[in-house]
């Protein structure tokens, strides 16, 4: 087991007849609940996104489901559970322009 949710699922499988864990989104899918506001001032928002991998975050149209929330010039910090991170700015077309990316040491 590699996470707390795996432990809970293991316990629930034994304790609750017919229990099935909630399906997890595919790694490339955007998940709105993983997007949160870190700071907001003067019409500028700094967002945080908990990503499964940073490659998908960089793909065109990835943040399209959040188009009504983000604006050009808003900043984004995206992180993964493995420690990878990136800093980006939202462009007018809804894509992100990466300013800095770091990868966790192996």
Image (spheres, rainbow, N blue to C red):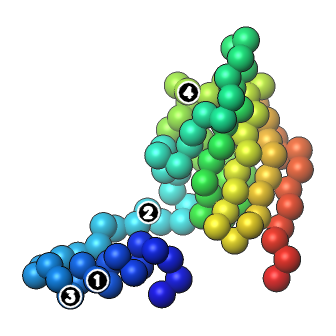
Numbered circle sitting on residue 11: 1
Residue reaching furthest right? 100
The local crowd at label 2, few if under 14, some if 14 to 19, many if 20 or more residues have their Cα within 10 Å, is few
Q: Which residue is mark 4?
A: 69
Check contact, mark 3 vs mark 4: CB within 8 A. Answer: no
Q: Residue at point 76% right, 34% down?
A: 75
Q: In front of the other: label 3 or label 2? A: 3
Tell me the element at label 2: loop
Q: What separation in Å lies between label 4 and label 2 (alpha carbons)?
A: 21 Å
Q: Is residue 20 left or right of residue 50?
A: left
Viewer-proximal residue among 18 and 95: 18
Q: Position of residue 27 (x, y in %)?
A: 54, 65
User: Taking the image as drawn, is residue 45 in sight?
Assistant: yes
Tell me which numbered mark, 4 or 2, is placed earlier along the sequence: 2
Tell me which numbered mark, 3 or 4, is placed earlier along the sequence: 3
Tell me the element at label 1: helix
Tell me the element at label 4: loop
Q: Which residue is mark 2?
A: 25
Check contact, mark 1 vs mark 3: CB within 8 A. Answer: yes
Tell me which numbered mark, 4 or 1, is placed earlier along the sequence: 1
């Amino acid at each position: 087991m590699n996470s707390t949710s795996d432990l809970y699922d293991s316990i629930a499988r034994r304790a609750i007849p017919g229990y099935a864990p909630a399906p997890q989104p595919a790694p490339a899918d955007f998940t709105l609940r993983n997007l949160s506001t870190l700071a907001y001032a003067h019409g500028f928002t700094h967002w945080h996104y908990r990503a499964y991998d940073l490659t998908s975050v960089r793909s065109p149209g990835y943040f399209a489901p959040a188009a009504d929330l983000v604006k050009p010039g808003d900043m984004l910090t995206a992180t993964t559970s493995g420690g990878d991170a990136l800093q980006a700015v939202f462009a007018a077309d809804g894509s992100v322009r990466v300013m800095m990316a770091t990868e966790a040491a192996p």
